[in-house]
């Protein structure tokens, strides 16, 4: 068939994926055969779970749309800032279950601190991450762009920042979770939920000073770790409030 030209304009922060072309959000591709829009977008370096809306010649299309002649394409990221969601959008928000890659330990702890369910194993390989993602219907959090491009991934996110608190704000904003934050309900170590524990039931496990000064405890239903509002508590609460208000500002 006759070669044709596709002109793609990437909106919002999708230019973080365009590498050396950052700042210049327009890319042209010459194609010689019918190609799916998803493949063309990913060939530019943008993983499909980051794409929320595609307009081909001003009409919204799905990832399976095929390009066969000269076309103008507009590609939009997920943006929950005041945009009204329509049925043309390709991503889901409100998803609160995640699986995180082995480099995101601090983000994982932060999200668990906010009450979100995050499966994490430092030594998990790509295949194991994808298996958990599919089996348990979780969104994939990874800094590995190639992994996010895997065809099996439906929901996922590539944290822009390298800083865990910033990443947490990004994830809460991307999935629109600020109303679902429930601090101190989940174990930071193992991800199981916490239950109230009567002091009498756990007193044998407490240090002498903890026995004296603290009266309210929670216990992990999984690993049995005991939590209480110790001296670090005000600092933690401050961090949580900061994350919550920044995420709201973004949402
Ligand atoms: Zn636990």
Image: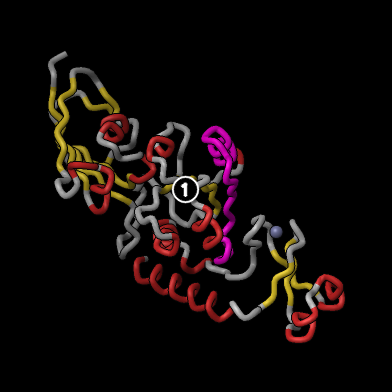
Q: Who's the residue at 30% across and 34% down the image?
A: 42
- Whether residue 88 appears in this view of the structure is no
Q: Considering the numbered disc 1 on the image, is that residue within a helix, a strand or a loop?
A: strand
Q: What are the residue bounds of the magenta stretch?
A: 112-134
Residue that sits furthest to the bottom in the current view = 213
Pointer 1 residue: 141
Residue 125 appears at what percent x and percent y?
A: 55, 36
Q: Is residue 128 magenta?
A: yes
- Whether residue 114 appears in this view of the structure is yes
Q: Is residue 139 magenta?
A: no
Residue 30 appears at what percent x and percent y?
A: 15, 25
Residue 121 appears at what percent x and percent y?
A: 60, 46
Would the CB of label 1 be found within 8 Å of ligand 1? no
Q: Who is closer to the viewer here, 210 or 58?
A: 210
Q: Who's the residue at 32% across and 60% down the image?
A: 84
Residue 173 appears at what percent x and percent y?
A: 40, 61
Q: Who's the residue at 43% across and 31% down the image?
A: 151
Q: Who is closer to the viewer here, 53 or 183?
A: 183
Q: Who's the residue at 24% across and 53% down the image?
A: 12
Ligand 1's quadrant is bottom right
The N terminus sits in image quarter: top left
Q: Who is closer to the viewer here, 230 or 244?
A: 230
């Amino acid at each position: 068939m006759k070669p044709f030209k596709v002109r793609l304009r990437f909106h919002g922060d999708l230019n973080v994926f365009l590498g050396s072309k950052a700042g210049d959000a327009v890319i042209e591709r010459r194609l010689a055969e019918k190609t799916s829009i998803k493949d063309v977008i990913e060939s530019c370096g943008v993983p499909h779970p980051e794409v929320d809306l595609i307009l081909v010649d001003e009409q919204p299309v799905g990832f399976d749309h095929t390009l066969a002649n000269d076309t103008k394409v507009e590609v939009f990221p997920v943006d929950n800032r005041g945009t009204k969601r329509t049925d043309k959008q390709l991503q889901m928000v409100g998803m609160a279950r995640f699986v995180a890659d082995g480099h995101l330990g601090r983000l994982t702890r932060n999200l668990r601190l906010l009450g979100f369910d995050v499966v994490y194993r430092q030594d998990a390989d790509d295949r194991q991450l994808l298996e958990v993602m599919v089996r348990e219907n979780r969104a994939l959090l990874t800094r590995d762009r190639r992994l996010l491009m895997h065809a099996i991934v439906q929901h996922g996110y590539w944290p822009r920042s390298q800083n865990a608190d910033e990443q947490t704000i990004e994830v809460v904003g991307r999935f629109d979770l600020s109303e679902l934050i429930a601090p101190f309900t989940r174990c930071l170590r193992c991800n199981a939920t916490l239950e109230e524990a009567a002091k009498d039931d756990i007193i044998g496990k407490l240090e002498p000073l903890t026995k004296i000064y603290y009266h309210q405890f929670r216990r992990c239903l999984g690993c049995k770790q005991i939590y209480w509002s110790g001296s670090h508590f005000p600092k933690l609460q401050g961090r949580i409030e900061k994350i919550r208000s920044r995420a709201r500002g973004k949402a």
